[in-house]
Amino acid sequence: MKVSRNAAVSALLLLPAAVLLIAFTFYPTVATLIDSLHSTPRGRRPATFVGLENFETMIADPIFRRAMVNNMLYALVTIPVSMGLALAMALLVNARIAGRGFVRLAYFTPTILPMIAVANIWMFFYAPDYGLIDQFLRPFGLGGNNWLGSPGTALWALIVITIWKMAGFFMIFYLAALQQIPPTLLEAAALEGASYWQRLRRVVLPLLMPTTLFISVNAVIEAFRLVDHVIALTRGGPNNSTQLLLHYIYQVAFNFWDTAYAAALSVALLAILALIALVQFGVLDKRIHYR
C-alpha cells in the first residue's frame, strides 16, 4: 500500500513536466513528421499523402544544399573557436587578476544583449566606408569593403558575431567547472614538478570534460538554430551566401507558405542534430571522468 502511494505521489510530481514535454516536444515532432509526408493544403484543397515526395524535392533543391554547406562551415568554425575562446577567458578570470569582477562582466555582456542591439552594433562595425572596420583599414588602403553585402565575406561576418556573442555564455559554464576543481589536486601536481601547461593538460582539461560535452552539445544546437542574426543583417543574401537551414525553413514556411516542405526540412534538421549528438556522446563520453 505504501509502495503504491509513493508511486502515485511520484507520478503526480512528474505529471507537469510530462505534460509540457509531450505538448511542446513529442507532439510537435510527431506532427512535423506527419506533415512532411503530406502536401501543403491550399484554400479548400486539403492536404494529401505524398510519401517521400517532399524529401525528394529537398534533395534536388540547390538552395537546401547551399544552406547545408553554409551551416556546416558555420558550425565547424564557430563551435571550436567559441569553445576555445570561452575556456581561455574562464582560465583568465578564474586567476587572481586585478579587476577580475569587471573582466567577467565585460566578457559576459555580449551574451545578455538583445539580438536587435547586437545587429545594430555590428552593422556599425561592418558598414562600408564609414564603418569602424573600414575606418581602421582605410589608412592602409584597404577600405571600401561591403562585409555583409559581398558573398565572399558575408558568412564570415556572421561567424565573427556569433563567436563574439557565444564565447561569454560558454565561459560561465567553464568558470563554474573550474571553481569545482579541488585546489589540492593542482597543488599536488605542482609539488611533483608539473608546469602550468602540464597541470592544465593532465589535471584541468580531463576534469572539465563533462562540462565540455555539455557545452559542445549546446554549441551544436546554437549553430543550427541561428535565424535572428540572419534576418536582421542579411536575410540569407547576398545570393544565398548566408542562407542557413533554420532561416531557409522560416522562409519556406512563412514567406512561401509551403508548410509541408518546411516540415520536411525540419525533419532533416532534427535528424542532423540527433546524429551529431549521438557522435558527440559516443566519442566524448569515453573520455569523461565523472567525480
Image (spheres, helix red, strand yellow):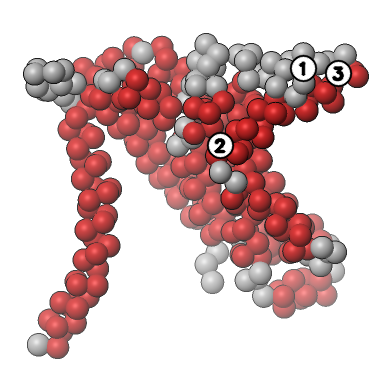
Cα separation, mark 3 vs mark 2, equals: 28 Å
Q: Which quarter shows the C terminus? A: bottom right
Left or right: 202 in relation to 40: right
x then y, percent, for residue 184: 72, 78
Left or right: 126 in relation to 73: right
Residue kind at label 3, given as amino acid type: Arg
Badge 1: residue crowd in 10 Å (few <14, some 14–19, many ≥20): some
Q: Identify residue for label 2.
A: 116
Q: Identify residue for label 1.
A: 129
x then y, percent, for residue 282: 44, 49
Local secondary structure at mark 3: helix
Local secondary structure at mark 2: helix
Local secondary structure at mark 1: loop
Cα separation, mark 3 vs mark 1, equals: 8 Å
Q: Identify residue for label 3.
A: 138
Residue kind at label 1, given as amino acid type: Asp
